[in-house]
Image: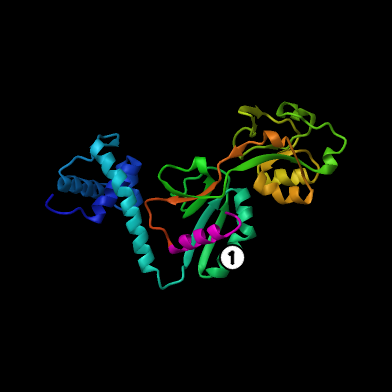
């Protein structure tokens, strides 16, 4: 190897390795596909090793290319972070920051994280978007997003917050008074269940687990909502029982406004993660937001 590879060549290779597509990789980097192809060809010439298999329809990694990408990716990420830190040691974070979260998580962030963030970083323009659907955050222009830990895309950096959580079946004392209470998930049809359905698709099934036995129930009820907060409000107002995240209904359970059912059947799920693109520089504003989340009770 006569000359060392340039950062442009290394970045072009990693983009192509992520997307397996020269056009998409070039769009990410803001360069022409022909320029990206030139960078990768120069890199292969410098290393005297073929890194990618190319055809008119597909791009794939050679065994050498896959090994090189696995070693190179974390090194480039660490270097990017070091450059950002060095460039922003004197300045307070500023500028726009777009964060995506589910309806439930967005509401929780509003309790302490967002007010604290603005009190400490007044020069950042934070945009918090509530959307429970799966979204390509790179394509939609988000800096980061929250999602359950087992649903994070492979090419993202994920930071886990908190332990596993549970889903709860809850109802108001007034609604449950005098009614037969179910001893198992199969008996839920004795109650009015508030169903949940996304904007597109069929209503969610209620998942339960006990002693290794798993049960999935299609709840029966006349009322259907598309957000967990609406399901919670329906339970509080005595419209039936709802199936909601424990973190959303915990306060109401503590005050007695709601009662939980089938606790021994409550299913758990992975804790929340904040994730962001692993191939981009971490903006100072995002780094500051992460620090606030880590310090808050939200975590």
- Above or below for 149 versus 91: above
Q: Can the viewer see residue 62 in this picture?
A: no
Left or right position of 170 against 11: right
Look at the magenta stretch and give its main secondary structure: helix
Disc count in the image? 1
Give coordinates of residue 121: x percent, y percent: 52, 68
The span picked out in magenta is 284-299
Q: Mark 1 points at which residue?
A: 116
Q: Position of residue 222 (x, y in %)?
A: 76, 34
Q: In the image shown, does 263 or 137 lie closer to the viewer?
A: 263
Residue at 62% in and 61% down? 112
* Quarter of the C terminus within the rendering: bottom right
Question: Given the current orientation, which residue lies at the most extreme left position?
Answer: 2
Residue shown at 85%/34% (left/top)?
179
Position of 113 with respect to 234 (left or right) is: left
- The local secondary structure at tag 1 comes to helix
């Amino acid at each position: 190897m006569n000359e060392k590879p340039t950062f442009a060549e290394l970045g072009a290779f990693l983009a192509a390795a992520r997307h397996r597509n020269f056009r998409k990789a070039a769009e990410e980097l803001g360069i022409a596909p022909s320029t990206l192809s030139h960078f990768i060809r120069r890199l292969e010439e410098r290393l005297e090793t073929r890194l990618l298999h190319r055809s008119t329809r597909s791009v794939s990694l050679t065994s050498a290319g896959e090994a090189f990408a696995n070693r190179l990716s974390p090194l480039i990420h660490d270097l990017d972070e070091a450059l950002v830190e060095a460039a922003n040691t004197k300045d307070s974070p500023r500028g726009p920051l777009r964060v995506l979260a589910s309806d439930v998580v967005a509401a929780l962030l509003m309790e302490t994280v967002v007010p604290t963030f603005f009190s400490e970083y007044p020069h950042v323009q934070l945009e918090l978007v509530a959307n429970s659907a799966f979204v390509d955050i790179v394509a939609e222009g988000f800096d980061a997003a929250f999602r359950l830990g087992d649903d994070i895309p492979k090419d993202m950096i994920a930071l886990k917050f908190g332990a596993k959580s549970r889903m709860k079946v809850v109802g108001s004392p007034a609604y449950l008074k005098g009614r037969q209470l179910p001893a198992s998930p199969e008996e839920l049809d004795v109650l009015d269940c508030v169903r949940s359905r996304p904007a597109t698709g069929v209503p969610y099934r209620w998942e339960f687990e006990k002693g290794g036995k798993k049960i999935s129930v299609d709840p029966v009820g006349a009322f259907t909502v598309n957000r967990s907060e609406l399901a919670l409000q329906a339970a509080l107002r005595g419209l039936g029982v709802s199936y909601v995240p424990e973190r959303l209904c915990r306060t109401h359970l503590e005050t007695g406004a709601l009662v939980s059912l089938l606790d021994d059947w409550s299913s758990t799920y992975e804790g929340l993660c904040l994730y962001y693109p692993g191939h981009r520089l971490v903006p100072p504003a995002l780094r500051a937001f992460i620090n606030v989340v880590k310090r808050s009770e939200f975590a």
